[in-house]
Image (cartoon, rainbow, N blue to C red):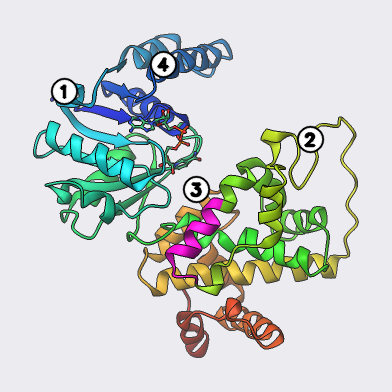
């Protein structure tokens, strides 16, 4: 059997360490590099401790853990990755810094090596522009924590070679992941389609329709979401979530559908970032029992329907603009952010006309472009069609 290609991972932070683990567990020799001294070594020591715990809990075979760990080593410079068939970059989210790293990798690696970026918000096309072989550059967007979350968004840039996306999808599938392919557009699938889950929930709170705990309760009970939006923003970190919202909004030339909220901006300015600071939308310092939430069933349904209509509209618009196939849009939301159902399949349950009605009502009431229905939602409602 042909030996598996070597995989390089640049950046040994949260994502790089996780991606290195995934590739090593799939049987690849992995080289890990970080600009910060000893960061790569520290990542391997952390991984060793994590795997030891899994073995102790009986969740992993001792020999398999040792083998995976034995496949990862550090390298002192990017030139050490010259034999890698694939390098995944997971460094700081800064276009100029990423371009410098890609230009250097482009010089060091073989002509047919694949250069992948784990960027969440930068254009793959812009990163590729730093390379003499931009056709070998692609986005491979993992979700946090990479060893546990199944989704990988595979993002060919404008000049990525035909067939490279399918090749990479096959590769990550062999790593036990679920690949979806999407266009190089802001937020890819998940970070674009998920925006209203947070934005519309905050808006409902701002209007005084319900409190945060009530909105969370509504979406968990009548919506079936595993976590409510406010709990989830506290888990992600309000600084991180606000930065993603801002970046998607700017990247769409300030489209009102993505306008960030003042409530979240104040939250960030106050330093109440969520679980990591002990306070966010909720307090995490006290050991007191969570308060029981009182919420009228009608109101819970209204909240869920409003947020869901906005989410469905985003998913339909992503389909309209050919960001990804209907199947991949639904897979992305169930495998990347644990939605209980794919949004397009969900839309079909009550039909496009129902969701169009909800949005048209909101748009008439508020007169805001924020609620404008996607042309595909209108068209599908008109002919009584389905998305899936
Ligand atoms: P992190 O801050 O945990 O790790 C980044 C690492 O890159 C640090 O160890 C840093 O020393 C290193 N680094 C910075 N500049 C470097 C350079 N020029 N050369 C080599 N190493 C360098 O960041 P995290 O969260 O792992 O994010 C990395 C990338 O993954 C970003 O592009 C981010 O947008 C993306 N991403 C992050 C997710 C998350 O939930 N944290 C999810 C999916 C993607």
Residue at the location (64% across, 58% down)?
A: 198
Residue at the location (66% across, 55% down)?
A: 265
Q: Tell me where the magenta segment starts and ends, as one range.
A: 243-254
Q: Nearer the viewer, mark 1 or mark 2?
A: 2
Under circle 3, the secondary element is helix
Is 250 magenta? The answer is: yes
Residue 171 percent coordinates (x, y): 27, 39
Q: Nearer the viewer, mark 3 or mark 2?
A: 2
Measured Cα–Cα span from mark 3 to mark 2: 26 Å
In the picture, measured across the screen, residue 362 lies left or right of residue 343, that is: right
| Residue linked to disc 3 | 336
Measured Cα–Cα span from mark 4 to mark 3: 25 Å
Residue 222 percent coordinates (x, y): 74, 60
Q: Nearer the viewer, mark 1 or mark 4?
A: 4
Magenta portion: prevailing SS class: helix
Measured Cα–Cα span from mark 2 to mark 4: 31 Å
Q: Nearer the viewer, mark 3 or mark 1?
A: 3
| Residue linked to disc 2 | 284
| Residue linked to disc 4 | 44
In the picture, measured across the screen, residue 214 lies left or right of residue 33, that is: right
Which of disc 1 and disc 3 is earlier in sequence?
A: 1
User: Would you say the residues marked 3 and 1 are in contact, meaning their CB atoms lie under 8 Å apart?
Assistant: no
User: Would you say the residues marked 3 and 2 are in contact, meaning their CB atoms lie under 8 Å apart?
Assistant: no
Residue 13 percent coordinates (x, y): 44, 29
Measured Cα–Cα span from mark 1 to mark 2: 49 Å
| Residue linked to disc 1 | 3
| Of 179 and 273, the residue lying toward us | 273
Under circle 1, the secondary element is loop
Which of disc 2 and disc 1 is earlier in sequence?
A: 1
Is 203 magenta? The answer is: no
Q: Residue furthest left?
A: 111
């Amino acid at each position: 059997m042909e030996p598996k290609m070597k995989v390089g991972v640049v950046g040994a932070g949260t994502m790089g360490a996780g991606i290195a683990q995934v590739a090593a567990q799939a049987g690849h020799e992995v080289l890990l590099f970080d600009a910060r001294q000893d960061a790569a070594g520290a990542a391997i020591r952390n991984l060793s401790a994590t795997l030891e715990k899994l073995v102790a809990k009986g969740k992993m075979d001792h020999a398999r853990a040792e083998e995976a760990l034995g496949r990862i080593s550090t390298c002192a410079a990017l030139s050490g990755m010259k034999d890698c068939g694939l390098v995944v970059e997971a460094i700081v989210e800064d276009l100029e810094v990423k371009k410098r790293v890609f230009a250097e990798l482009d010089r060091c690696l073989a002509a047919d090596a694949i250069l992948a970026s784990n960027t969440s918000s930068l254009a793959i096309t812009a990163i590729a522009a730093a390379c003499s072989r931009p056709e070998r550059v692609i986005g491979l967007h993992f979700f946090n924590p990479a060893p546990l979350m199944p989704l990988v968004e595979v993002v060919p840039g404008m000049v990525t070679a035909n067939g490279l996306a399918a090749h990479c999808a096959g590769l990550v599938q062999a790593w036990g992941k679920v690949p979806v392919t999407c266009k190089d557009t802001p937020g890819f699938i998940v970070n674009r389609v998920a925006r209203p889950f947070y934005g519309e929930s905050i808006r409902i709170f701002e209007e005084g329709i319900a409190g945060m705990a009530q909105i969370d309760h509504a979406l968990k009970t009548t919506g079936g979401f595993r976590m409510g939006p406010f709990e989830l923003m506290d888990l992600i970190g309000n600084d991180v979530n606000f930065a993603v919202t801002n970046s998607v909004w700017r990247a769409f030339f300030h489209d009102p559908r993505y306008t960030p909220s003042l409530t979240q901006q104040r939250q960030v300015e106050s330093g109440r970032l969520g679980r990591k600071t002990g306070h966010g939308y909720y307090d995490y310092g006290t050991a007191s029992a969570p308060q029981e939430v009182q919420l009228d069933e009608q109101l819970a349904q209204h909240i869920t329907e409003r947020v869901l209509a906005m989410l469905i509209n985003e998913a339909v618009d992503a389909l309209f603009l050919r960001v990804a196939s209907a199947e991949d849009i639904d897979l992305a939301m169930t495998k990347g952010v644990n939605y209980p159902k794919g949004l397009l399949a969900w839309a079909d349950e009550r039909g496009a006309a129902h969701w169009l009605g909800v949005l048209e009502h909101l748009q008439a009431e508020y007169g805001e472009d924020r609620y404008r229905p996607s042309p595909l939602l209108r068209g599908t409602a008109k002919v009584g069609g389905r998305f899936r």
